[in-house]
Image (cartoon, rainbow, N blue to C red):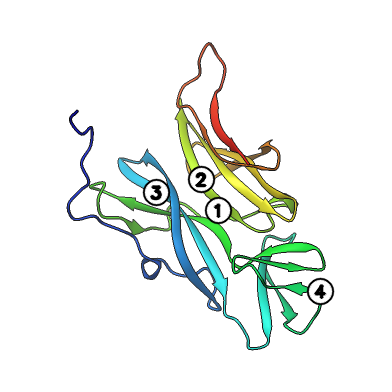
């Protein structure tokens, strides 16, 4: 059976050093799972940017988005018996889980669909509200008519769930809240309605 697609031989890959950190005291750990779309005669990727605060000896630093939408750093002493550091991805303190990184969505664009660069045309998208306090991740983009629908994983102490935002101009966004409750993620809406109904693939966990 012939291959339906072939990997581009130059294999362009975006690396953490290609993106500027959102704050000087944060380090970009990795770029993950972009949503792809066409806008303004360009190809765009909406990247998940995972950042980690610099760690202090003897302490564990965990980042969250506070109610004002700003990154807040929580620090826990290693000798505190309430702290569990057995999982390198998740800290648990006094029965509550915190992530070691915090993610937001950042856009890069390309004129040829191969070489991507960051532009400030589309603002970064960050977590908002209690169900996005640990960040937002892994966005999928569907265009239906003039509207773009962004489904993404919202992360908080309550678990992972699916949030929805929409836009027409990529400058102004409407938040529609959660469309799948915890625990659920990796949702993608189909690019057209069927008999007037929206359909989506999602991944209950």
Q: CA distance from mark 4 to mark 2?
A: 34 Å
The foreground one among 146 and 132 is 132
Pointer 2 with pointer 3, Cβ within 8 A: no
Q: Residue at x 78, y 62 (%)?
A: 96
Pointer 1 with pointer 2, Cβ within 8 A: yes
Label 3 neighbour load within 10 Å: few <14, some 14-19, many 20+: many
Q: Nearer the viewer, mark 1 or mark 4?
A: 4
Pointer 4 with pointer 3, Cβ within 8 A: no
Q: Residue at x 20, y 48 (%)?
A: 8
Q: CA distance from mark 1 to mark 2?
A: 10 Å
Q: Nearer the viewer, mark 4 or mark 2?
A: 4
Up/down of 90 relative to 46, above or below? below
Which secondary structure lies at badge 4?
loop
Q: Earlier in the sequence, mark 2 or mark 3?
A: 3
| Residue on which disc 3 sits | 45
Q: How many numbered marks appear?
A: 4
In this picture, residue 1 sits left or right of residue 62: left
């Amino acid at each position: 059976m012939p291959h339906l697609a072939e990997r581009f031989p130059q294999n362009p890959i975006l690396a953490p050093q290609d993106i500027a950190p959102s704050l000087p005291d944060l380090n970009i750990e990795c770029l993950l799972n972009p949503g792809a779309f066409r806008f303004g005669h360009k190809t765009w990727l909406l990247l998940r940017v995972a950042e980690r605060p610099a760690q202090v000896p003897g302490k564990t630093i965990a980042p969250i988005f506070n109610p004002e939408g700003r990154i807040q750093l929580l620090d826990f002493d290693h000798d505190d018996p309430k702290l569990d550091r057995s999982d390198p991805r998740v800290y648990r303190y006094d029965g509550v889980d915190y992530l070691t990184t915090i993610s937001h969505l950042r856009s890069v664009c390309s004129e040829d669909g191969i070489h991507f660069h960051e532009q400030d045309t589309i603002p970064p998208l960050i977590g908002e509200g209690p169900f996005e306090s640990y960040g937002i991740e892994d966005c999928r983009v569907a265009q239906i008519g003039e509207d773009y629908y962004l489904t993404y994983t919202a992360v908080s102490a309550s678990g992972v769930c699916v949030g929805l935002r929409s836009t027409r101009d990529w400058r102004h966004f409407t938040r529609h809240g959660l469309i799948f409750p915890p625990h659920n993620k990796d949702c993608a809406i189909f690019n057209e309605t069927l008999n007037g109904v929206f359909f989506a693939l999602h991944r209950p966990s």
